[in-house]
């Protein structure tokens, strides 16, 4: 008798869009559907998502992926979730309605609260307990803001009915028909509320932020049991067996399970993560210590350099400035000119993350003269992505005894050949791009498939992955390095811009 289970369903809830992908027994993509997500910018530096839209969009993606491949829910062995991290919301568990839009990881509205906490000397406690640099990026201060908003604007709300979560928790709660309120350790480690050593909510931090513990989801291993989908939803109860933060999922997909192995994802932001193994790493260069993933038996940790706005700058060129009509257009435009004509862009649209951690930095173009054309501006923006990654690689090299010798990449913007070549040039090391660029979805599928027994062996899955192209440092390397030094000067000028 043939096994009726053909696929793992991976749900990838990214910052810019939601995707459902079916992975077959070979770890290859069998079908998928995608929907871009609306970005709400209510004020400068603020960014929100509509959690109900996320839920409805992913449902329609699942339906479409099943329909176009002629798959029924009973053919799905398990579901894996991977999500944009840190973004969080509050909802009423009796109605299932969010109390406010979700505050997205890039949102800077709580920078003043972070400054207040820093002045009160709380940054060291937070770093020691969570491995994170005190910053508005993480969920804790966003939850504080949401709770304050509810108290002020909806004073009649019964807080006993309210629960909190990151996007994975929201999705899981909905998929299980409200039965499971949980998250996994990799997402929890980004809230700035999880004790990295114990792997549980830190009671001192919950008290510091005045967040009632009953609001918080249960933290479970990234690979294990998260319940099943509600039987009425897809016509079959599908087990949910893995949840990863998006960057950790991509680390898993790249096969980076041993200390020193690393990858960089080029999505809305860029995230360079190096596997640290079983010991919690501690950086001297303001890189983050974080959970890579956990099973019931063990935890793996990682060191991370988070750069907030990279692909987001390309989206801004398209939607904000309307300088381009598609992200792909940046590549031929950048190739039309031999350099950026002296223009340097600092991509601090949401402040600067690693290695600067400056919430008050803002984006800027510098070095503009009369001869500068659209092509130069576009090229300067692409180059700035590679420069940021270079800075973080340098920080990683300072933090470890082994210099980065090769960069594995993935994510939407890694499609851009110009950017990847420029990246290899400025880094002086090869850049390796796999055939499947949806490494986040692939990682969640691998995790869910391994946890459910659908896939027998991790190493086998990794061995089957194919490399699309390796970009080697070329003729442009010395010029790229020279320009990188000038760009660093521009970064210094963009720092400390807003109070
Ligand atoms: P996320 O998971 O953060 O939503 P994705 O990995 O889906 O991100 O990548 C989307 C991002 O990649 C967008 O910000 C988009 O502007 C950028 N992008 C997509 N294609 C290209 C391209 N060809 N060149 C440069 N950037 C691109």
Image (cartoon, rainbow, N blue to C red):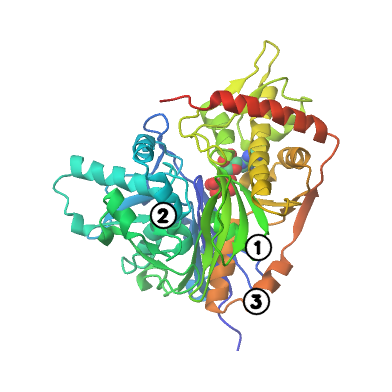
Disc assigned to residue 259: 1
Residue at point 82%, 32% (across, down) = 478
Question: Between disc 1 and disc 2, whose residue precedes?
Answer: 2
Residue that numbered label 3 is attached to: 457
Which quarter of the rendered picture does the C terminus lie within? top left
Question: Between disc 3 and disc 2, whose residue precedes?
Answer: 2
**Height in image: 256 above or below 16?**
below
Q: Nearer the viewer, residue 306 or 25?
A: 306
Quarter of image, ligand 1: top right
Q: Secondary structure at mark 2?
A: helix
Please state the horizontal and vertical placement of residue 403, each as a whole percent of the image.
73, 51
Question: Between disc 3 and disc 1, whose residue precedes?
Answer: 1
Give the class, few, some or many, for how many residues have Cα within 10 Å of label 3's Cα (few <14, many ≥20). few
Residue that numbered label 2 is attached to: 167
Please state the horizontal and vertical placement of residue 463, each as a whole percent of the image.
73, 68
Give the class, few, some or many, for how many residues have Cα within 10 Å of label 2's Cα (few <14, many ≥20). many
Give the class, few, some or many, for how many residues have Cα within 10 Å of label 1's Cα (few <14, many ≥20). some
């Amino acid at each position: 008798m043939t096994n009726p289970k053909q696929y793992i369903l991976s749900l990838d809830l990214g910052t810019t869009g939601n995707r459902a992908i079916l992975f077959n027994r070979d770890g290859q993509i069998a079908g998928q559907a995608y929907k871009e997500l609306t970005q709400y910018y209510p004020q400068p530096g603020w960014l929100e998502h509509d959690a109900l839209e996320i839920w409805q969009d992913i449902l329609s993606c699942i339906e479409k992926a099943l329909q176009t491949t002629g798959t029924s829910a009973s053919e799905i062995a398990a579901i894996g979730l991977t999500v944009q991290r840190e973004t969080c919301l509050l909802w009423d568990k009796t109605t299932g309605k969010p109390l406010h839009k979700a505050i997205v990881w890039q949102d800077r509205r709580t920078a003043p609260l972070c400054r207040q906490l820093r002045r009160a000397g709380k940054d060291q406690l937070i770093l020691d307990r969570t491995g994170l640099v005190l910053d508005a990026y993480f969920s804790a201060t966003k939850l504080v803001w949401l709770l304050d908003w509810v108290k002020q604007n909806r004073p009649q709300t019964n807080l006993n009915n309210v629960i909190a979560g990151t996007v994975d928790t929201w999705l899981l709660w909905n998929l299980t028909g409200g039965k499971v309120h949980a998250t996994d350790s990799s997402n929890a480690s980004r809230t700035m509320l999880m004790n990295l050593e114990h792997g549980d909510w830190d009671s001192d931090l919950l008290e510091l932020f005045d967040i009632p513990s009953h609001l918080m989801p249960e933290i479970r291993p990234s690979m294990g049991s998260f319940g099943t989908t509600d039987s009425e939803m897809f016509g079959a109860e599908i087990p949910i067996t893995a949840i990863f933060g998006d960057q950790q999922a991509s680390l898993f997909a790249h096969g980076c399970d041993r200390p020193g192995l690393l990858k960089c994802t080029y999505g809305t932001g860029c995230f360079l993560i190096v596997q640290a193994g079983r010991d919690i790493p501690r950086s001297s260069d303001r890189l983050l210590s974080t959970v890579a993933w956990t099973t019931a038996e063990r935890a793996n940790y990682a060191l991370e350099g988070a750069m907030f706005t990279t692909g987001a700058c390309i989206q801004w060129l398209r939607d904000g400035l309307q300088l381009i009509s598609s992200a792909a257009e940046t590549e031929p435009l950048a190739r039309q000119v031999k350099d950026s004509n002296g223009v340097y862009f600092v991509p601090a649209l949401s402040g600067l993350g690693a290695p600067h951690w400056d919430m008050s930095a803002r984006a800027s173009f510098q070095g503009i003269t009369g001869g500068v054309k659209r092509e130069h501006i576009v090229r300067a923006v692409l180059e700035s992505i590679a420069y940021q990654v270079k800075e973080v690689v340098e920080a990683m090299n300072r933090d470890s005894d082994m210099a980065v010798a090769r960069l594995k990449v993935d994510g939407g913007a890694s499609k851009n050949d110009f950017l990847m070549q420029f990246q290899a040039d400025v880094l002086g090391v090869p850049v390796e791009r796999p055939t499947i660029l949806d490494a986040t979805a692939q990682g969640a599928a691998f995790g869910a498939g391994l946890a459910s027994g659908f896939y027998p062996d991790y190493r086998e899955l990794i061995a089957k992955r194919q490399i699309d192209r390796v970009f080697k440092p070329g003729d442009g390397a010395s010029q790229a390095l020279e320009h990188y030094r000038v760009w660093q000067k521009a970064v210094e000028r963009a720092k400390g811009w807003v109070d």
